[in-house]
Amino acid sequence: MQKIKPQIRFAWIFSAMVLLIACAAEFERKAPPTGLLEHSAYRSLQQGLQSLSAGDFVASRAAFDRVLELASPGDSQLVFLGVYYGIRSRLMSDQPVSADSVYEHWRLSLPRGQVAEIELVLGRISPQLTEAKLAQMESTANTLGVILPLSGKFSEFGNAILEGIELAVQEYNANFPEENYAKLKVADDRSDQIRAASLGRELASEKSIFALIGSHGNETSMAICLVASAERVPLVCPTASAPGMDDLGPMVHIINRTDPDLAVTLAEYAVEKLGYQTFAVLAPDDDYGNLLADTFDTALKARGAAVVSSLRYSGEIKNFENQMNLLRRYLPDAIYLPAHSNEITQIAAQVYYYGLNQVRILGTELWNNERVIRMGGEYVNGVVFVAPFYEKSSSLRWNEFKDLYESAYRRPVNRFSALGFDSADLVLNAAAKFPTSRRVLAERLNSIERHPGAMGVYTIKSTGKVKRDVFILEILNGSIVPAGASDAQVDSLGRPIPSDSPADNQTPRQTP
């Protein structure tokens, strides 16, 4: 059996952690009397997920085995979770024979769709498309399946994404007679990962469905990704961004993914254009922060630059005095801060407060935010970052979408709706005409080259990975502008214009 990729291992662990939320809700509905709590299948499931997320595979295997011992035969979902995560625990501790044994014992107790998901994990079926499977995809599909949280705690985001999807479908249908319209079938996952997976299987089984879009964020999106990959139905995730989710095969498309190549582009610019040679890194100690920090570090060293300090911090830290005092000893040319959105202004203020205001801050696409500018003030002035979105660029459809959205809904535009619009727009343009087949759509979707959307210029590889052209930007005097330019020195694509040359028609920079 092939060794599991680190990115996919992360995706599995991430999925296990967030599934605790759904399992907790299920536990509340079906909890046994208090005296039996410690011996319940649901308690064992929670314990197993906690151990798996902590990397304790021995304890997690034992807990998931208890789930299968205690679960009622009629509770097929609980049996599936016990088998599914019991197999993951064994694979992640390099016990493929034991994993196969669990699968064979329980295979006949599981629905076909769930068996396919487990076989995908075991490597018995490949996430790559096969001719036999593609041949079964009939050219009769005309419906886009949408799974979003339309009620519950994330309903505001789910409904915003749906608005963008509906605008893309309306725009598409305006160019065709009614018999060739694209239709929508919308389902509410209520931010529940288990429900999202169930809805995904249900829609994937319908021949009229040519693709899926969903859900909001990483938790429920991961559940749908596994279903889409196993059932061979094209899926576009509008807002999911966790590292590793785009390694689940060519049917899974993460358009808002965390792209480590952005860190490479930023490192190249800092060394070759800004002339910096010494750097420090201060990143959150999680998969997001470590991925970007490690990629940035490697890219710098490949270009002969020095990383004088590479620090990590936990999410609980509010005061960075120790880290800042250490950085003051080195006084690097620049400091890379791949911080989360809610940490950015706090860390930037402390860089300034501890006397490091002469050190250039380098950021990520999360700095591309009006809130950062408004709350960061002078602390974020001069920050350079790389992002796939720049609203003043005419290479994007942002202004066009903004006008379309505000005309339709009579309120200010938002990026969630824009990502929903791009998700549907990519799928509809790949299909070209309805009815269609999943086969045709999959082939065309994975050969898209530099398609302009509201939130980016998209290229999709044969592997399903989505790349976006990037802009190198700077926060300057309360505005976001191309790095090295003032507002008066920006061309129609949002790039700096040399003082001795007119604007040209070159496009934004493409990542490798």
Image: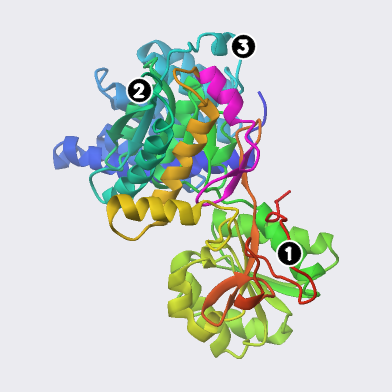
Give how far apart the Cα atoms at labels 1 and 2 are: 51 Å
Answer whether residue 498 is magenta in the image. no
- For marks 3 and 1 on the same chain, the one whose residue lies earlier in the sequence: 3
Q: Quadrant of the N terminus?
A: top right
Whether residue 238 is visible to the viewer of this picture, yes or no, is no
Q: Residue 242 at x, y = what percent?
A: 51, 48
For label 2, the residue is 178
Q: Nearer the viewer, residue 298 or 238?
A: 238
* The furthest residue to the right: 304
Would you place residue 137 above or below residue 69 in this image? above
Answer whether residue 447 is magenta in the image. yes
Q: Residue at x 48, y 80 (%)?
A: 376
Q: How busy is the neighbourhood of tag 1: few (under 14 within 10 Å), some, or many (20 plus)?
A: many
For label 1, the residue is 267
Task: Check disc 1 and report its element: helix, strand or loop.
Answer: helix
Q: Is residue 404 left or right of residue 427?
A: left
For label 3, the residue is 131
- Kind of residue sitting beneath label 2: Glu
Q: Nearer the viewer, residue 508 or 79?
A: 508
- Kind of residue sitting beneath label 1: Ala
Q: Residue at x 55, y 12 (%)?
A: 133
Read off the magenta span.
438-460
Q: How busy is the neighbourhood of tag 3: few (under 14 within 10 Å), some, or many (20 plus)?
A: few
- Kind of residue sitting beneath label 3: Glu
Task: Check disc 2 and report its element: helix, strand or loop.
Answer: helix
The nearer-to-camera label among 1 and 2 is: 2
- For marks 2 and 3 on the same chain, the one whose residue lies earlier in the sequence: 3
Q: Nearer the viewer, residue 148 or 37?
A: 148
Q: Is residue 358 left or right of residue 137?
A: right
Q: Residue 111 at x, y = what percent?
A: 36, 15
